[in-house]
Image (tube, rainbow, N blue to C red):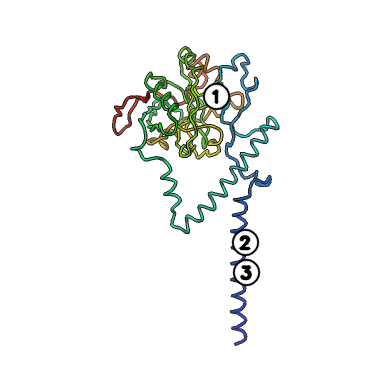
């Protein structure tokens, strides 16, 4: 009788201790979530997490061509080139770590609550009937293989960025995207295009900046969103990138999406050739200054595996869009 009572007491004590430790762990995680940002959490982030904002003459070997780069505020993988940049990278890493903790916490709640967070994430994009026109891109050289083609469709969202959408429609209507190389593909980050293969055409657009669109809470840099590259405030011209993961930190840096991919994200966008890596001088990929000046003659000879846009037309694969461009 004494032995049974002792066992029950021990079991009860053990359960109480476990419950206390569980509560302690939950409280600790919540505190990290709310009060994070300490230096010890920096090491958790390994994804590309920053945007290069400097415009030094070392950004291209062709010093005299530096003014031609219309996206000097380019998305970059972390480096440690200056103390200021290092500080920015550390802050970005802390943000990424906090985001990881947030997803972990909310993911646990979703398991308990029946997975409602997944449905909420799917509902973040606006319904098709509230969006603008569709543009379908036909892409060749997927995975660097000639003849391997596919299509993806972008649904524009004028309520997010009316000026950006108007410029995108203008470029589509004149066939600007046709034969543009997808010159920058960083898996799990972005794919980037929008320098015309004909230097004469590109030169006409290089300085035709449009003003920024005011930020909109609903316009966030989620996977599949389409965004103009920029060299700073009011400098959008023709370069576009597609987020291939959730890049929430871009929301605070002035990158406003103009639409989102509705078809072909996995089968086409994720299959664009990424073998050349980051562009020069940070990597071995194409130099944007030379693309501006030499166009596809430079890319086709030195980077022949790049995926490229064969054609871009208004409408989706399901139904042709007959609306007129926004005014």
Q: Residue at x 51, y 14 (%)?
A: 294
Q: Residue 71 — which label? A: 1
Q: Tell me the SS state at disc 3.
A: helix
Pointer 1 local density, CA inside 10 Å: few below 14, some 14–19, many at least 20 = many
Q: Residue at x 54, y 21 (%)?
A: 70
- Is the Cβ of the residue at disc 2 closer than 8 Å to that at disc 3? no
> Visible in this render: residue 270?
no
Q: Viewer-proximal residue, 2 or 140?
A: 2
Question: Which residue has dot 2 on it?
Answer: 24
Above or below 194: residue 154? below
Q: Tell me the SS state at disc 1.
A: loop
Above or below 184: residue 65? above
Question: Which residue has dot 3 on it?
Answer: 17
Above or below 73: residue 15? below
Q: Residue 165's spot in the image, x, y percent?
A: 42, 27
Name the side, left or right, on which 24 lies relative to 203: right
């Amino acid at each position: 009788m004494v032995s049974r009572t002792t066992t029950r007491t021990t079991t009860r004590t053990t359960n109480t201790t476990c419950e206390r430790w569980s509560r302690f762990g939950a409280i600790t995680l919540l505190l990290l979530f709310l009060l994070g940002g300490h230096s010890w959490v920096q090491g958790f982030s390994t994804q590309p997490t920053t945007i290069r904002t400097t415009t030094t003459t070392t950004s291209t070997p062709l010093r005299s061509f530096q003014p031609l780069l219309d996206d000097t505020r380019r998305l970059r993988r972390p480096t440690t080139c200056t103390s200021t940049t290092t500080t920015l990278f550390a802050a970005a890493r802390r943000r990424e770590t906090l985001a990881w903790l947030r997803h972990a916490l909310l993911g646990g709640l979703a398991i308990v609550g029946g997975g409602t967070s997944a449905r909420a994430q799917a509902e973040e994009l606006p319904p098709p009937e509230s969006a603008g026109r569709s543009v379908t891109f036909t892409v060749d050289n997927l995975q660097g293989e000639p003849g391997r083609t596919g299509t993806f469709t972008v649904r524009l969202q004028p309520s997010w960025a009316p000026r950006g959408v108007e410029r995108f429609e203008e470029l589509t209507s004149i066939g600007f995207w046709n034969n543009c190389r997808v010159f920058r593909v960083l898996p799990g980050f972005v794919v980037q295009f929008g320098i015309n293969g004909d230097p004469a055409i590109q030169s006409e657009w290089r300085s035709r900046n449009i003003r920024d669109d005011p930020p909109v809470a609903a316009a966030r840099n989620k996977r599949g969103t389409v965004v103009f590259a920029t060299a700073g405030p009011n400098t959008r011209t023709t370069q576009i990138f597609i987020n291939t993961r959730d890049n929430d930190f871009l929301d605070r840096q002035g990158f406003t999406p103009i639409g989102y991919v509705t078809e072909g994200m996995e089968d086409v966008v994720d299959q664009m050739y990424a073998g050349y890596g980051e562009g020069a001088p940070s990597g071995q990929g194409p130099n944007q200054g030379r693309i501006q000046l030499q166009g596809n003659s430079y890319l086709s000879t030195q980077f022949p595996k790049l995926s490229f846009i064969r054609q871009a037309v208004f409408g989706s694969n399901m139904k042709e869009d007959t609306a007129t461009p926004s005014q």
